Image (cartoon, rainbow, N blue to C red):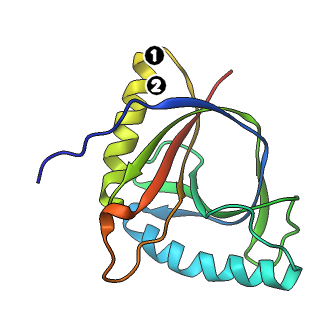
């Protein structure tokens, strides 16, 4: 299998983003289990609150990964979200981000981050410590994995 290739990242300005999240510090191997547990909790809390999502789910890393990751599994909402059990409100500030679109299976996300962080460094840009991925499409069982799209981003200082 050849290494994935990515387009040059782009810089975008993002508005403040309100989220309903389940945030935990997890080992890298435990990330899928966190998503499997968190997303149903978030959607149930949104239902109880009568709140509709305003965008696809995200995963937000609040620092560079090491043996563990400070991770928010998140769903964007229009207004600040009031805490509901394990689901909390979180707001990402407005700012600039470097992004790259990943088409294909989720195993391309880690190489996409490497590509993105390398590009950011080469441009002389400074990351804030927040990196994220937004799952624009959901893979379907038996579906074509090349149709899966994930936007990978790194928030930038200034």
Task: Bin the neighbour count of mark 2 within 10 Å (Cα to Cα): few under 14, some 14-19, many 20 and up.
Answer: many
Q: Could you say which is closer to the camera, residue 121 or residue 129?
A: 121
Indicate left or right for 108 with 1 as reference. Answer: right
The reply, left or right, for residue 85 in relation to residue 98 is right
For the C terminus, the quadrant is: top right
Residue 123: mark in rendering: 1
Taking the spot 45% from the left edge, 47% from the top edge, the residue there is 65
Q: Which residue is located at x 87 percent, y 79 percent?
A: 49
Is residue 66 at least partly visible in the picture?
no
Rendering coords of residue 54 (x, y %): 74, 62
Residue 101: assigned label = none
The residue tagged with tag 1: helix, strand or loop?
Answer: loop
Q: Are marks 2 and 1 in contact (CB under 8 Å)?
A: yes
- Nearest the eye: 36 or 57: 57
Residue found 46% across the figure and 25% down from its top: 120
Place of residue 153 in the rendered image (x, y in percent of width and height, measured from the top left): 53, 42
Measured Cα–Cα span from mark 2 to mark 1: 5 Å
Please provide percent x and percent y for residue 66. Answer: 41, 48
Quarter in which the N terminus is drawn? bottom left
Q: Is residue 21 above or below residue 97?
A: below
Q: What number of labels is visible? A: 2
Q: Spot the residue most to the top.
A: 124
49 vs 101, left or right, is: right
Determine which residue is flagged by label 2. Answer: 120
Whether residue 82 can be seen here: yes
Quadrant in the picture for residue 56: bottom right
């Amino acid at each position: 299998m050849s290494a994935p290739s990515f387009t040059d990242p782009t810089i975008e300005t993002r508005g403040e983003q309100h989220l309903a999240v389940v945030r935990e510090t997890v080992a890298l191997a435990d990330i899928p289990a966190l998503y499997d547990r968190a997303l149903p909790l978030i959607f149930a809390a949104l239902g109880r609150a009568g709140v509709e999502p305003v965008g696809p789910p995200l995963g937000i890393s609040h620092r560079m990964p090491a043996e563990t990751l400070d991770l928010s599994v998140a769903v964007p909402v229009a207004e600040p979200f009031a805490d509901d059990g394990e689901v909390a409100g979180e707001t990402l500030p407005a700012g600039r981000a470097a992004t790259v679109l990943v088409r294909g299976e989720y195993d391309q996300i880690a190489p996409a981050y490497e590509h993105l962080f390398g590009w950011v460094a080469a441009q002389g840009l400074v990351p804030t410590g927040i990196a994220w991925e937004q799952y624009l499409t959901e893979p379907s069982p038996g579906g074509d994995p090349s149709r899966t799209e994930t936007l990978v981003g790194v928030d930038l200082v200034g």
